[in-house]
Every structure is written in C-alpha cells, then in structure tokens.
Amino acid sequence: MPRTLVMGILNVTPDSFSDGGLFADTDAAIAHGLALVSDGADIIDVGGESTRPDSDRVDEKTELARVLPVVRALVDAGATVSVDTTRASVADASLTAGATWINDVSGGLADPAMLGIVAARGGSYITMHWRGHAREMGANAVYDDVVADVARELAACRDHALAAGIDPGRLVLDPGIGFAKTAEHNWTILQRWDALEDLGFPLLLAVSRKRFLGSLLGTADDPRPPAGRDVATAHLSAHFAARGVWGVRVHDVRSTVDAIATAERMGRA
C-alpha cells in the first residue's frame, strides 16, 4: 500500500457507544457517509448492529433495512463501502448492493456460512479476533498471555478464511482491541504489535474513541466521554501509520487524515 487507508465509521444504529442514533435516519446516514468521504475517508464502514459491550442483538430483517439503502446510495455516489456484520445473509445482500468489504468482528465464528459466502462472491474480508457476542465477551477477557493468545486465535481465523477460499490478497486481520479485552490487555497488544505483524497479513487498527482511551484521559471510574477521545485516536493512528499499518478505522476522519499526513511527511524527512 502507498499509504495507510482510513476507514470512516458510519453507525446506522440507535445504540452504538459513541454516536448511536445520530445517523439512524437513512438520509442522515447517507449525508454523513458522504461527509466522511469529503474529509478523506478511503472506505466507509456501515454498521447496522451495535457491538458495544452488553448491547443486545437485532434481528436480520432490521439489520438489512438499516444497512442496504445506505450502502446502495454511497456506492452510487462513488464511495468504497464496507459492511460491519457477523451475518452471512447481510454480507451477501451487501455485496449485491455494491459493498466491496465485509468487516466481520466475529472472525467467521458467529455464522458458519460467512466465509463461504464471501469467498464465493469474491469479496474482501476483515477477520477480527473474537470471543463471543457483546453480552458474553466481558467474561471471556481471560488470557495466559494476551498477545500470544490473540495472535494464535487470530491466526486460526486467518487460516479458516483462506481454507474457505477467500483470496489472500483480499484478507485483512484485526486483533479486536476492546473486544473481550481489558484496558491493560489493549495497551499490551498495541505495545507488542510486532507479534501480529508476524502473522504475515495486512492489519487494521480499530481503536477509535474506545473506553481504554477514555480511561487514560480521565479515570477508569470516570472516563472522558467518547467525543473527547479523537486526539488520542489520531495520535495512535499516526503512530501505527508510521510503521505501515494497512488501515485505521475511525469516527473523526479529518483529524486522523491530518495526523497521518503529518507523520508520513516526518518519515520522509
């Protein structure tokens, strides 16, 4: 890649942790997606089901109704679109609607049909380290060595995706920062990122506005609110862009694009 890609987050949900409800209306979602493109996003990641801790699942019909009109409109406007889903049916319909990427936070574990669908459709796939849905994952944040365990489990997701026929050139790995991980787990993974680079595939950094940043900037009991975490997000984005990360997934695209451009210019200097 000539540079790190920026994936703009577009939650078309009423209950996402940072911006739930702001873009639940289809017209508002489309307008925000186009604004993210204008701010410099390379990919718009559309999500119709919140994966914040302790959130409830939505049914397939609801997820499809939220996602598909937005995907179609953004693709028609020339945007490259990803869909954040764990359901094979939603992935299939989204690829039909023009999405290029499927961003599966379950790493293919939530729906056994997912990998085969993406492979058959020739889709690009982001597979994430996962230990259960939102109401389960907190209890599963137990590791012998968080970096070794995450790397091993993520490698298994990688191998399953390849065995299903997903094109190796269309596969990206995500260690799942904030999913079944404590704040200390998150920082340890970020500090030992080289263990993930050793897996041999492009990596996505998805830390935007997450609680561990709020705890750093405030306290564990009184974290800084999500909208106040964008500077920290941009700093981490620039740091990992400087070491060649494939992409970063963020809410505030403009600050991250600016931070990456600055870091890359310093690298050339």
Image (cartoon, rainbow, N blue to C red):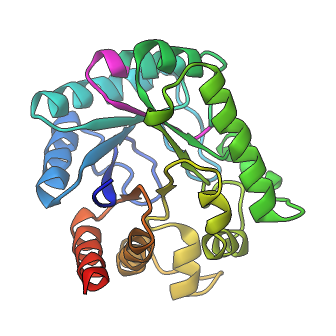
The residue nearer to you, when weighing 17 against 147, is 147
- Left or right of 68? Residue 13 is right
Where does residue 172 sit, x and y in percent of width and height? 50, 43
Residue lying furthest front = 269
Where does residue 194 sit, x and y in percent of width and height? 63, 67
Q: Give the range drawn in magenta.
A: 94-106
In magenta segment, residue 19: no
What is the count of numbered marks?
0
Where does residue 232 sit, x and y in percent of width and height? 42, 80
Residue drawn where x is 24% and y is 80% of the image: 262
In the displayed structure, 141 sits above or below 229; it is above
Residue lying furthest right = 144
Residue drawn where x is 45% and y is 48% of the image: 15
Residue drawn where x is 53% and y is 76% of the image: 213
The residue nearer to you, when weighing 13 against 85, is 85
Can residue 105 be seen here? The reply is: yes
In magenta segment, residue 102: yes
The residue nearer to you, when weighing 260 against 26, is 260
In the displayed structure, 25 sits above or below 160; it is below
Which quarter of the picture shows residue 153?
Answer: top right
In the displayed structure, 21 sits above or below 225; it is above
Residue drawn where x is 71% and y is 61% of the image: 181
Residue lying furthest top = 120
- Left or right of 167? Residue 155 is right
Where does residue 269 sit, x and y in percent of width and height? 25, 87
